[in-house]
Image (spheres, helix red, strand yellow):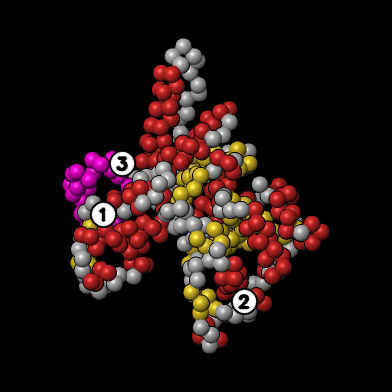
Amino acid sequence: MGRIAVVIDNGSGFTKVGFAGEEKPRFILKTASCLPNCTSAMRGMPCHLDALGMAPSQSRPLKHGMVVDWEAMESLWSHLFACGLKTSPKNWPVLMSDSPTSPPSSREKIAELMFERFSVPAFHVASTGLLALCSGGSLSGLAVEAGAGVCHTTPIYAGHTWHKATFRLDMAGAALSKYLHGLLLEACPDPRLQALPRRAITKLKKQFCYVSLDYEAALQRSPTPQHPSTSFHTANDCLVTLTNELFRCPEPLFQPSLLGHSSPGLPSLAFQALQAVPETIRPKLAANVVVAGGSTLFPGFPQRLGLELEALCLKQQQQQQQQRPAATSGTVLHPQLVAKPERGLAAWVGGSMAGSLRPFHRLWVSRAMYEERGAGCVHEVFD
């Protein structure tokens, strides 16, 4: 297969599409977008709602990173080809991302749609965790992802995903935006704040919020020069002053209980993932903890994650020494975080890099293979 591949990263918040070998996606669309109820996109024709005189449909095809509405997902992919890339899917192999915790049936369904509905010549699906590692040029490490709808900690060794050691947190950026809105109303119960659209809240979150390295201490001393307040006017002329809301907003990533979740925070999930793989490969994975996803872009997030993960590793070593003082101490893990500025697009960038490599081409499922073996062949080829 010598043709350039189309790379699609399906996110709960945004779906990104472009061509392998390029640095950035060509087209980014909100996954929960208004899409046309039309078939022109399936034929590779641009679809414009006004020109067609058709009403759009509002749908959220993904929930917590998992496809829950296949019809809406199909419409979204059609729209990306027709209106984003302005080309027919029949002309391009497709590399697509998938949640690390998706069931096997989901990958079969994606393959079925790609070959049966979109008539692609070849197809590959990879977990976002693996693609995040690929974005940094590695195939071994621990991917810590936080997007709009879900967080994952995924250990990967030599390109193999340890699925039983992968953990998820069904709370991420969208929940943080809702939490911030609640904090604003708690501080200032103004009806104009109640009417703020979600996009405005999300913009505030991305522009002003940050992760505190010591949350409890910060609560006691805010606002200070180190934890200043921020004031702004909303579009409906409401003056809002943010103080501790600035760092309270992303804190549920570390303390999910703040939003009523019983799951541990991301540092603990990352630690659990390392402990769930064979001891012999833990040091290599800990030495390459790749941070990815839009909800990891808060200032202070990588530093806090690194500090807490290091503390958990040290605490375990101390406990082992107390329990077995005469025994030889085990391997001490020293987590090393990789947090690139462009990590919000890590999964797509990793797919772009992988799809452009010649050795990767042997991992494609061809149309001939699909027609011979059916959708189940994805499990023979993909990890």
Question: What is the crowding at mark 1: few (fewer than 14 residues within 10 Å), some, or many (at least 20)?
Answer: many
Is 347 left, or right, of 199 in this rendering? right
Q: Name the residue: 31% across, 58% down.
A: 180
Q: Name the residue: 23% across, 57% down.
A: 242
Q: Amino acid at mark 1?
A: Glu
In this figure, which residue is indicated by the disc labeled 3? 213
- Given the current orientation, which residue lies at the most extreme right position? 372
In this figure, which residue is indicated by the disc labeled 1? 245
Precedes in sequence: disc 2 or disc 3: 2
Q: Which element is circle 1 on?
A: helix
Where residue 89 sits, quadrant-wise, is: bottom right
**305 or 356: which is nearer to us?**
305
- CA gap between label 3 and label 1 equals 15 Å
- Given the current orientation, which residue lies at the most extreme top position? 326
Q: Amino acid at mark 3?
A: Leu
Total number of numbered discs in the rendering = 3
- Image coordinates for residue 310, horizontal then vertical, percent: 41, 32
Q: Which element is circle 3 on?
A: loop
Precedes in sequence: disc 3 or disc 1: 3
Q: Are marks 2 and 3 in contact (CB under 8 Å)?
A: no
Q: Which residues are magenta?
A: 208-230
* Above-or-below relation of 277 to 31: above
Q: Are marks 1 and 2 in contact (CB under 8 Å)?
A: no
